[in-house]
Image (tube, helix red, strand yellow):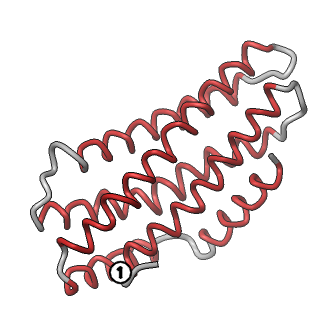
């Protein structure tokens, strides 16, 4: 971890998101093999991606961190922020497709499994690369460009976002990440 608690918070959340993405990818392998899959885990993944990845995590980046970077000289348009924001939108689109594919999924109809696998593969391609960009490029840049007083303010604002979440939401989603990881 770094000496930047705001970045550390986001990095910890990335680890949970990746655990779910890789667990989801494992379920795609089970579908591909014709094995029985717990569809409730697939549905919970949609909820996880919307509630944890988007509302808990992306909101802190989009509403707090990225504007702070712009305030300290990083252009909003162009790399890296524009690309990351585009990838957040792509993630939302893919989660919508995932929900539709889950709703259409019928184990005895291979084409529905193939569609589900295809969406899961797209999610598995997007998220690790996206998270790498943030962890390896944006977060170190944050520590270099944003002064300590502003970093403290960012962390305080992150804590305000967290205070608006339902009690126990992180714990619930961490348990889900463990479940989907062990199910695949």
Q: Position of residue 163 (x, y in %)?
A: 46, 78
Question: In the picture, residue 172 is in which quadrant?
Answer: bottom right
Question: Label 1, on which residue?
Answer: 4
Indicate whether 10 appears above or below 104. Answer: below
SS for callout 1: loop
**Left or right, 137 with reference to 175:** left
Please name the residue shown 28% across and 65% down the image: 65
Q: Position of residue 103 (x, y in %)?
A: 69, 28
**Left or right, 143 with reference to 103:** left
**Left or right, 145 with reference to 87:** left
How many C-alpha atoms fall within 10 Å of the one at disc 1: few (<14), some, or many (≥20)?
A: some
Q: Position of residue 80 (x, y in %)?
A: 25, 49
Which one is in front, 46 or 16? 16
**Left or right, 104 with reference to 78:** right
- Total numbered labels: 1
Q: Position of residue 181 (x, y in %)?
A: 75, 54
Which one is in front, 181 or 154? 181
Please name the residue shown 48% across and 39% down the image: 126
Which one is in front, 45 or 75? 75
Indicate whether 174 appears above or below 47. Answer: below
Question: In the picture, residue 143 is in which quadrant?
Answer: bottom left
Please name the residue shown 17% across and 71% down the image: 145
């Amino acid at each position: 971890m770094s000496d930047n608690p705001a970045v550390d918070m986001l990095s910890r959340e990335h680890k949970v998101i990746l655990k779910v993405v890789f667990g989801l990818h494992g379920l795609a392998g089970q579908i591909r093999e014709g094995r029985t899959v717990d569809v409730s885990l697939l549905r919970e993944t949609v909820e996880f991606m919307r509630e944890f990845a988007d509302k808990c995590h992306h909101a802190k980046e989009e509403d707090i961190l990225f504007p702070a970077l712009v305030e300290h000289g990083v252009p909003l348009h162009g790399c890296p922020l524009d690309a990351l924001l585009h990838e957040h939108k792509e993630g939302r689109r893919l989660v919508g497709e995932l929900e539709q594919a889950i709703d259409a999924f019928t184990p005895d109809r291979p084409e529905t499994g193939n569609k589900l696998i295809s969406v899961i593969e797209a999610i598995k391609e997007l998220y690790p690369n996206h998270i790498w960009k943030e962890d390896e490029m944006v977060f170190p840049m944050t520590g270099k460009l944003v002064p300590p007083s502003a970093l403290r303010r960012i962390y305080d604002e992150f804590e305000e976002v967290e205070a608006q979440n339902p009690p126990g939401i992180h714990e619930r989603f961490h348990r889900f990440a463990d479940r989907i990881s062990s199910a695949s």
